[in-house]
Image: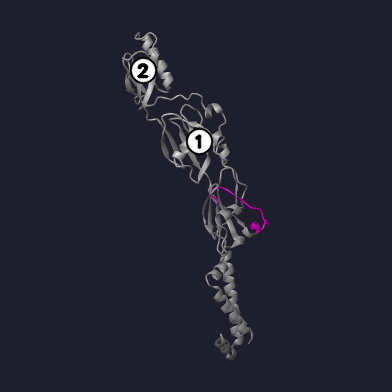
Amino acid sequence: MNLLATLLKGSKSMPRLRMLTCSLLAALLLSFATASANAQFSGPGVKSPVPADTGTPTTDAALLHPANRSIYLTPGDLVTVHIFGSLDYTPVVRVSLDETIQLPLIGIVSVKGLTVQQAETLIATKLRTSGMYVDPQVSIQVTESTNGVITVAGEAHAVIPASSERRLLEVLSAAGGLPPNASHTLTIDRPGVDKPLVVDLGNDPMHSREVNIPLYPGDTVVISRVGVVYMLGEFKTPGVIPIQQNSPLTLLQATSVAGGTLYAGKFQDLRIIRTVDSKRTFVQVDVRRVMLGKDPDPILQADDIVYLPTSALKSAVVSGGLNLLISVANLAVISARY
């Protein structure tokens, strides 16, 4: 630096050098400002979030806890027919694809849409009207059933064997539990029930007994996906954050889960990017003002993208570009002396 000062002192063109140095410094600072000020998105601001329609939880106790849940016969079931007091009539038959069975003495019997109890009554009636038995007491035993499972679909996949009643939490545990991005509102499709059952597991363990409803063979538990927020840019741990059911997620909460902001972030230019009707929109937020309580804390919606861009000036400082600024500033100071 002393050599540079000596050269500058002896130079006859100092005004020109001083002007050139100042121009270089101004251009450098302007380039930092320009690089960090270019917007990448445009659009209207954030609107109030609209909760997703997950369905109204079923409250009818007769549906959630049926007293006597009937088992329906389905194609492929292997059944044994018994008549009380008669050891000679014990045919073992399989329900065909057209939902019929063929029995001795009475021939083909349609069991389409029938429960085991209804099929027992139908077979007893046919045996009585055919004159084979006076008052037969028929019982049907399902020894093998293709429908003897409970299916878990959606965000978790499993086929759980179920020859009789099983509990919801037991089935979910056997399926590996709920994944992090799974909704706590479940839909259960049950044969013989017109509308799906909607069960809200909630987040309170004291509520578990109420939602641990019985499940039966043939039931299908559908686990939907809960919304997520994508954290990009200058966060300590950028990634995907699930939105908890019935609990709003704010910008500061998401920032905290992402480990906080990094020094190189351009705090006054944080963008919340949202897709509305296939159109991408964004709003610009000063996250530092939000942290200080000077601006409201925005509520995020499912599939929002929170992007914290990099400040070119801060990035230059972090990566060692500060040495360049110091050198230019020293050059400007030296030139100003002569």
Which is closer to the viewer, label 2 or label 1? 2
Q: Tag 1's secondary structure?
A: strand
Outermost right residue: 294
Q: Secondary structure at mark 2?
A: strand
| Residue located beneath label 1 in the image | 187
Q: CA distance from mark 2 to mark 1?
A: 37 Å
Neighbor class of circle 2 (other Cα within 10 Å; few <14, some 14-19, many 20+) is many
204 up-or-down from 315: above or below = above
**Of the pair 180 and 271, the residue shown nearer to us:** 180
Residues drawn in magenta: 289-304
Query: Magenta span has 106?
Result: no
Magenta stretch prevailing secondary structure: loop
At label 2, the amino acid type is His
Residue annotated with mark 2: 82
- Which of the numbered marks, if any, corresponds to residue 104? none
> In the rendering, at what x and y percent does residue 17 appear?
59, 84
Horizontally, is 258 left or right of 136 in the view? Answer: right
Mark 1, Cα crowd under 10 Å, few <14 / some 14-19 / many 20+, is: many
Q: Quadrant of residue 255?
A: bottom right
Residue drawn where x is 64% and y is 57% of the image: 291
N-terminal of the two: label 2 or label 1? 2
Q: Quadrant of the N terminus?
A: bottom right
Residue drawn at (38%, 10%) of the image: 128
